Each structure stands twice: as structure tokens, then as C-alpha cells.
Image (cartoon, rainbow, N blue to C red):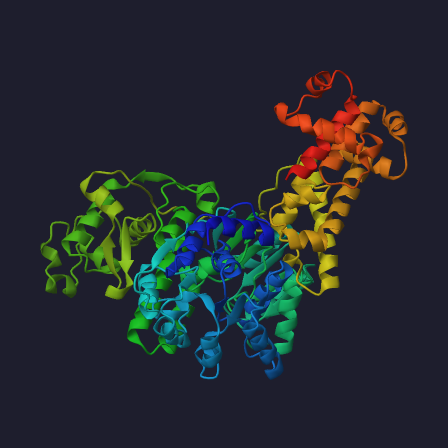
Amino acid sequence: MTLSNASNALKKYFGYDAFRPLQAEIIEAVYNKRDALVLMPTGGGKSICYQIPAITLEGVAVVVSPLIALMKDQVEGLSATGIPAAFINSTLTSEQTRNVENALMAGYVKLLYVSPEKLVSQNFQPLLKRLKISLFAVDEAHCISAWGHDFRPEYTQLRFLKEQFPDVPILALTATADKLTRKDIIGQLQLPDPAIFIASFDRPNIKLTVRPGQRRLEQIIEFLKQHPQQSGIIYCLARRTCEELADKLNARGFKAAHYHAEVPPTQRSKTQEDFINDRTPIICATIAFGMGIDKSNVRFVIHYNMPRNLEGYYQEVGRSGRDGLPADALLFFSYQDVMVYRDMIEQGEADDTQKELKTAKLNRMYQFAEAPVCRRKTVLFYFGETYDRNCGNCDVCLNPPRQFDGTIAAQKALSAIMRTKESVGMNMLVDILRGSQRREIFEHKYNEIKTYGAGKEYTFDDWLYLISQMLHIGLVEIAYDEHNCLKVTDEGKKVLFDGKKVSLAMPQPKVKSKPGEKLPVMPEKSKSQMLKEELFGRLVALRRSLAQEQGVPPYLIFSDATLDDMADKRPFTDADLLQVSGVGERKLQLFGDAFIGEVRRFVLEKTEEGNRITGSTQLISFNLFQKGHLVEEIAEMRSISTLAVAGHLATMYERGETLDISQWVSPEERDIIQGALPMFAEPFAMKEIFEHFGGRFNYDKIRFAIADYKRHRG
């Protein structure tokens, strides 16, 4: 199997012309029967990495997923593209399960989704051993590690896969795993020599904004006014907050619903279905919501309360903008959130190691919220990715704080870390720099190192602020498996030993927002942008109507990104529509006529209103011809030449329209003209061809012969 097969399948089933970064390399590793650990951010295209091999390889791919709702969405989405997929989980009856098993044994299924509990159960093992398995894909693989933020004990039983199926490649996929978690995933799954693929965690389409938690409701309302009719999730810490916030938003004219564990299952299910199907745009929910949703057109995520850790924050933020279009992430934070979480950790965690780990990650989350450092740079470094610039799409970059040359301050802190043999945490480091008289300092003889007391010019809080920045820009890192001790990174050593300069920001006075203060007004839009948005809105409405008829979520028909590209390209023919990103052969067959018809109606209407739209002149001539007007009549009606009208019709025919061209050029004449075309360079100059035949064929005959040649050569 080659990457050429994979590329053909990508275009045929998914409608994409090229793979995203690392997807091709991961697929090639599977083709070579290599195990792999794959880290990609939410919306980064992880599923393609196992779906394409599943389609192209012999046998069935088994996908392990802990999210039952997501299994259903994935199978529905694959079925819509013409790919045979199925799932087995607790929602199926025994008869439905038998039907799936029969289809598996008959070779009718290419992807099987199962829960980890089902996979390891005794009654499932015989079926597994009878199947020809092309690969195992372990989704949400961070759940296997106790160091991860969402540990699930049943995942640890998956180690049997490599023991019982040593020749079947295993793909472990996750969107959130730091270095320690990645190492643990490999060990838990017993992958002897896996290829490791770490895609960029950068989601440049998501604007990251962090604000203090005062006047949250007023700020949310102003935010929602700037995102009319858009789908979004508002995450809340408390169940009561979810309900109260949804009620307040509904009272202000927004359509919102709440979702949490105490809501009756039938109501929860309806709320989720209404959100997926775009009937309810705003959901106020606890963090459980969204885990099993593959909805691509979520345009914003708001955190009413600060999340517990950066893994959870970035995973939840990643539920917006999965289609690659612009999205917003707004986080409110307060120290009160930290205190609530600390109480929850103390009361709910018996394991001291886990308690210490969760507290350290909570502190890191708060430092992120307070730090005057590019948000994207901070998050990417946390996941082990170097980002040596400012993103320009977060609140810090858009309103940068005043900087100062912090090289000397950084060198003092880095030197102290090295002189303590990288064995202290942040508070102890600050006490050493400020010359504290703490008993532990004297017990470890830290008072004897050169940097003891070297930082008395800064207060304790100022040092915490500076060291947090050093942490976020990648000069130091926290070793969570070594009691949260600070370690100097390679970048930090460049500052300490090579004199590399570093800019830091000192704390700025907190500016209180004024009552009634509003967000900045959006700039006026151009005429072309307004036309595009109007067409996009009509395509969204058509998608919603078709989704209701089909009984599927709208985004499974086409994503917002596909509709956005469609509104840009305005396809008039099947060939045009296949050039739209995300339109494959199956979707063209199912929905092509409806969307092409809507685009044509829009273009014709807007042209009649006096708008200049690229490509519309050919469509207008063709539309008039379809209504029975002669070429001469069209030319007179439009005040253009008959040659121009014939050119319009030839162009539409070349692009795939049904048209009897024998009235312009006979089959015999067409064959003669086309036989000579290889003698001429493209683009064909009709005058040269006309002269080649000594005027035997007029320009209309030549034009339609060329159009037919171009139409059929591919």
C-alpha cells in the first residue's frame, strides 16, 4: 500500500486535496506495520490517521473510544461519506449486536468502534480473534496514564493488545499529554519501539482571551451580541450556575439550555441533540459536556470559571473552531476558583501523589491566567512545543504589557535553580532569592549558595510573577514526578550561560472595568464580504433543511469550513463543486444538485440587483439558453456579441453542464479539430488553430471542440 492510495482515498471520501501536517507520515508508519504515539490538538485531524489506513488496508480497523456518543457521530459521519463503519457498545440490543458481528465476519465493515470495557470483556475476545484486523486505534490514549488529567483504570487493561496481536500496529492518539504522560502511554500499552508524532498544538484560528471574573454576565452578553446565531459552549464549575446562567441568557433574548449530571437523562439527551442539530445554539454546562460531540461548527467556548489544569482548558477550548474557521475562547478567572478547586482536591483525593500533582497543575493554570505572556506561547510550551514568536491573536498580544530587560533577574533565578541541583519548587526558590530565614533553607544549606539573597530588590509576589513568566516562555519547567521541582530547560541555559537576552513584564495595576463598558465595535464590511456572508447564510439554511430531512446533524452534511469555501468559490457545476474543500464523490452525489442550485439562484438574483459577481455572466447566458432563448436573442438582451454568448455556453459545457454541442460542431468536425490540438500549446489560441485549418472551421466550431476536449481529457 502506498501514499498514492491514501491520497486518492482522501479525495474520494473526504474531498480534501492534501493531508494536514504529519498525517501522511503517520499513515505511512501504519502501512509499514509500525506502532505509533500520535499527539494532535483537538480538531487537528487525528481520525484521518486511522480512517484512511482502515479504508485502504485489508481487514477491519478496531477503534477504542471511551465516548459512546462520539462513536455514534463518527459512524454516522463515515456512513455519509460512503465508508462502511459500525460500533458495538451498551446502547445496542443483542439483535443489533449480532447484526454488526455478522457484517464484520462477512467483511462489510472497515471500521469498528468499541469501548475499552467491551474490548476487554470475555465475550468479545472470541470475535476479536476471528477477525482480520488491520490496526488498533486507541483514542483518548491519555486516559491510560495516572499522570494524565482524565485517568480511567479500565484503559490499563489494553496492554493485552500487543501481547495477543503482536503483528497488528497500534496507534495511540491523544490531544492532551505532557512529556510524563506520553512516556506512560507507551509503557502501559507495551509498545516496544513506537514512532512518535507530535503535531503542532497551535490552533491559530482560535483567539485566546483571559479576563478577571468581575461582571461576568455583562461581559458574556456583550460577547454574545458580537456572535449572533453562532454555536457555543459556556463551561461552569457549579451545576446551579449552569441553570441560573442559562435562565438569565434566555431572559435577555438568547436561546440557551443547561446541561449537568443531575439533569434527567432524557432531558440531557434532548439538550445535546438540540445543540448538535443547531436548534439550541448556546449550552451552559459542566465540563462533561462536549466530550462525546464531534460538532465542527462550534464558534466559541467561554469558561465562566477557571479550569483545573491547562490540559483540560486546551481540550475544552479545542471544541471550538474544529473546521479551521475563526473561533473565540474567553476565560474568566478568580482566586476564588482556585480555593474551591483546592478544597475539592483535598476532600476527593486520598492518594498524596495525585493530590500534589493536581494542586501543582491547578497552580500552573492560575499562573497562566495571570501571566502577561502570549497565551499561545504559554500553552504550546506546556505541551513541549517551542514557539519563538508572539501569536498576535490573544489578549496579551493585542494589548501587550510594558516590558523590561529581565535578563539579570532571569539569570539570578536560573542560577539558584542550578545551584540547588534543581531540587526546589517555586516558593522555596523565591525564599532563597530573597534571603529568607526559613528553617528548611538552613537545613539544606541553601543559605551558602552564591545566589542566596541575590533578589531582595523584588517582593515575594513579584518574583512569583517573574518566575511564572519564565515558566511560560520555556526557560524552566516543572517536574511533576519529582515533587514539582523546577528544572532549567535548554532555552534557560542559553540565558544563564550564553547571555541570551530575555524580556519580562512587571505586574501592571489592575484597571477596573467601568459599568456599561462595551467591547470594541467591529469594522465595517466590504460589499464582497457582505455578499459572501449572505450566501453563506443561505447555504447554512439549506444544510439545516437537508439535515432535518435526513435526520442527521447539519455538520455531517457539510462543515462550516466547506460552506465557507463554497461561498468563496460559488460552484455552478459538479466539477466546480468537487474543487470545494470537503466535498467528496459521495456527498456530491447526495447533495450536489441542491447546493449548486442554491448558489446559482443566489448569483442570478444578485446579478439582477446590479451586483458584479465573478463568473456570473456565463451563468446568466446559460440560464437564458436553458429557458429556450436563441444565442442571437441572448446577445441582444444582454447587449453583447453572439461570439461572447457562444463562449459563455462553451465554458459552462466544459465545466460539466449538459448541452448538445452538435448544433455548433458535428462529431466528425470535433474529431478532426481535437486530433490537431496536441500540436498547439495551452492555453489554445483559436486564431492559430483557425489558420492551421485555412479557415475550414469557424471560431464557434473550434471553441466547442476545445471545450469538449478539456471536459473529457481528465
Residue 351 is drawn in which quadrant? bottom left
> Residue at image x 79%, y 25%?
700
User: Quarter of the image holding residue 485?
Assistant: bottom left
The C terminus: image quadrant:
top right
Residue plotted at (18% across, 58% down): 436
| Position of residue 345 measured from the top left corner of the image (x, y, whole percent) | 38, 73
| Above or below, 273 relative to 708 | below
x and y, in percent, of residue 486 in the image: 24, 57
Residue 438 visible from this viewpoint: yes
x and y, in percent, of residue 112 in the image:
53, 69
Question: Which residue appears at 28% of the width and 55% of the height?
Answer: 477
Q: Nearer the viewer, residue 604 or 202?
A: 604
Relative to 163, is 120 on the left or the right?
A: right
In the image, residue 351 sits, relative to residue 647, either above or below, namely below
Residue nearer the viewer, 713 or 93 = 713
Q: Is residue 462 above or below residue 295?
A: above
Question: Up-down: is 559 above or below 111?
Answer: above
Count the numbered circles shown. Answer: 0
- The answer to whether one can see residue 226 in this image is no
Percent from the top left, x then y, of residue 307? 45, 63
Taking depth in this image into account, of 272 and 403 the one nearest to the observer is: 272
Residue 499 in the figure: left or right of residue 672? left
Question: Quadrant location of residue 698?
Answer: top right
Q: Seen in the image, is 119 located left or right of residue 11? A: left
